[in-house]
Image (cartoon, rainbow, N blue to C red):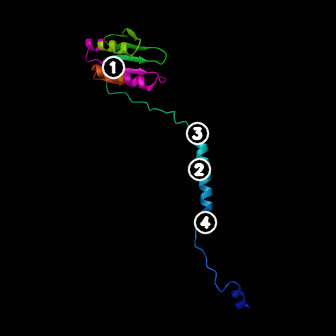
Amino acid sequence: MSSSFSSLRGGRSRKFKSEINVVPYIDVMLVLLVIFMVAAPITNPGVINLPTAGKSTLPPPEYIQITLKPDTNATIAINGQKSGAGKAEIASGRSDLVQKLGALHHQNPEMAVMISADKDIKYDEVIQAVSEAKKLGFDRVGLATR
């Protein structure tokens, strides 16, 4: 009987295929892809928690403080021990800020500049203020932190 059974199959013996079945792996990868596509919009990349900076070794005795706020114009004040609270001047625009900083630099070229900006202000405005102070010749320009 075994000879008739083998003749029905054509006389060939059965061979095992040694191939990997990749369909389950593709299914798992598609499920992971869908999970990452759904989870990606949940995270907000626009929120950045900035670190707080440590205090410098010695703050300057006198400095020009520029306060930048999003709704008002820039405020320039001279702060320090000698001048007390200092009188505040309001700059109406970037050109007015540059002009007033130039006049202050002409009076005292060694004075440092400290820029304090509201967290809601555009980062570009802070960088422009730092750049303008450096262009005028101020050697020490710093940013105020919490």
Pointer 4 or 2: first along the chain: 4
Question: What label sits on residue 33 in the rendered view?
Answer: 2
Segment colored magenta:
103-128
Tell me the SS state at disc 1. strand
- Please say whether residue 137 is one of the residues in the magenta stretch: no
Q: Mark 3 or mark 4, which has the lower sequence index?
A: 4
Quadrant in which residue 106 is drawn: top left
Q: Are marks 2 and 3 in contact (CB under 8 Å)?
A: no
Q: Which residue is mark 4?
A: 21
Q: Where, quadrant-wise, is the N terminus in this rendering?
A: bottom right
Q: CA distance from mark 4 to mark 2?
A: 20 Å
Q: Do the residues under discs 3 and 4 have CB atoms within 8 angstroms?
A: no
As drawn, the residue found furthest toward the front would be: 10
**Distance between the Cα atoms at labels 1 and 3?**
41 Å
**How dense is the environment of label 4, judged by Cα within 10 Å: few (below 14), some, or many (20 and up)?**
few
Q: Compared with residue 84, is residue 16 higher up or lower down, i.e. above or below?
A: below
Query: Is 81 displayed left or right of 37 in the figure?
Result: left
Q: Secondary structure at mark 4?
A: loop
* Disc 2 element: helix
Residue 80 visible in this rendered orientation of the protein: no
